[in-house]
Image (cartoon, helix red, strand yellow):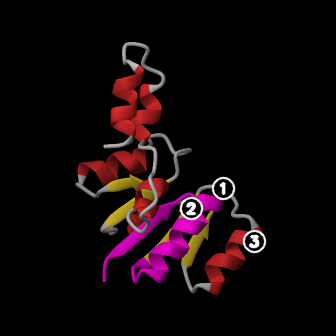
Amino acid sequence: MKRIVILGAGESGAGAAVLAKVKGFETFVSDMSAIKDKYKELLDSHHIAWEEGHHTEELILNADEVIKSPGIPNDAPLILKLKAQGTPIISEIEFAGRYTDAKIIREQALSAFQDVSMSQEEVLDLMFE
């Protein structure tokens, strides 16, 4: 069974965890901050293991894939360790996108809006590739 670790247990992290569990993944959630009670209850009701207030490296570095909250910097030491060992790191939106037929505006297109050198047509092409 593929092991998915979710870093960040806010609304979208907890939602990604439930989706991973429902799709048959071994799922673990870790958050450096306190997790809101409603998300703890949600995780518990789906029998998803979680931790708060710290990240236990042994429980994270053995992931097959990591779903990272956008609030965690890409240069955080744990993220750098995951990258160094080749663990795929994706966003909550990217993970959820695997399980829907809905059109999703790609993250690259959203960041392209910040790039004034791109034309509107180029941005739209990125959005609907």
User: What residue type is disc 2 on?
Assistant: Gly
129 horizontally vs 7: left or right: left
Highlighted magenta segment, given as a residue range? 1-26
Of labels 1 and 2, the one closer to you: 2
Question: Which comes sooner in the sequence, label 3 or label 2?
Answer: 2
Cα separation between marks 1 and 3 = 14 Å
Task: Estimate the x, y position of residue 123 in percent, counting from the top left.
Answer: 39, 28
Dot 1: few (<14), some (14–19), or many (≥20) neighbours within 10 Å? some
- Indicate whether 76 appears above or below 1: above
User: Relative to the observer, which residue lies in front, 120 or 80?
Assistant: 120
Residue 8: horizontal and vertical position, in percent? 56, 57
Query: Could you tell me how far apart the alpha carbons at marks 3 and 2 are, in whole angstroms?
Result: 13 Å
Residue drawn at point x = 42 percent, y = 22 percent = 120
Residue placed under numbered mark 2 in the picture: 13
On whether residue 63 falls in the magenta region, the answer is: no
Instruction: Determine which residue is flagged by label 1.
Output: 33
What residue is shown at x 41% (from left), y 55% (from top)? Answer: 94
Q: Amino acid at mark 1?
A: Ser
Comparing 86 with 122, the one in front is 122
Secondary structure state at the residue bearing disc 1: loop
Q: In the rendered view of the protein, which quadrant contains the N terminus?
A: bottom left
- Mark 1 or mark 2, earlier in chain: 2
- Residue pointed to by mark 3: 38
Residue 98 at what x, y percent from top left?
A: 38, 64
Give the residue drawn at x 37%, y 13%.
117
Q: Residue at x 32, y 69 (%)?
A: 62
Q: Are marks 1 and 3 in contact (CB under 8 Å)?
A: no
Mark 3: amino acid? Lys
**What SS does tag 2 mark?**
helix
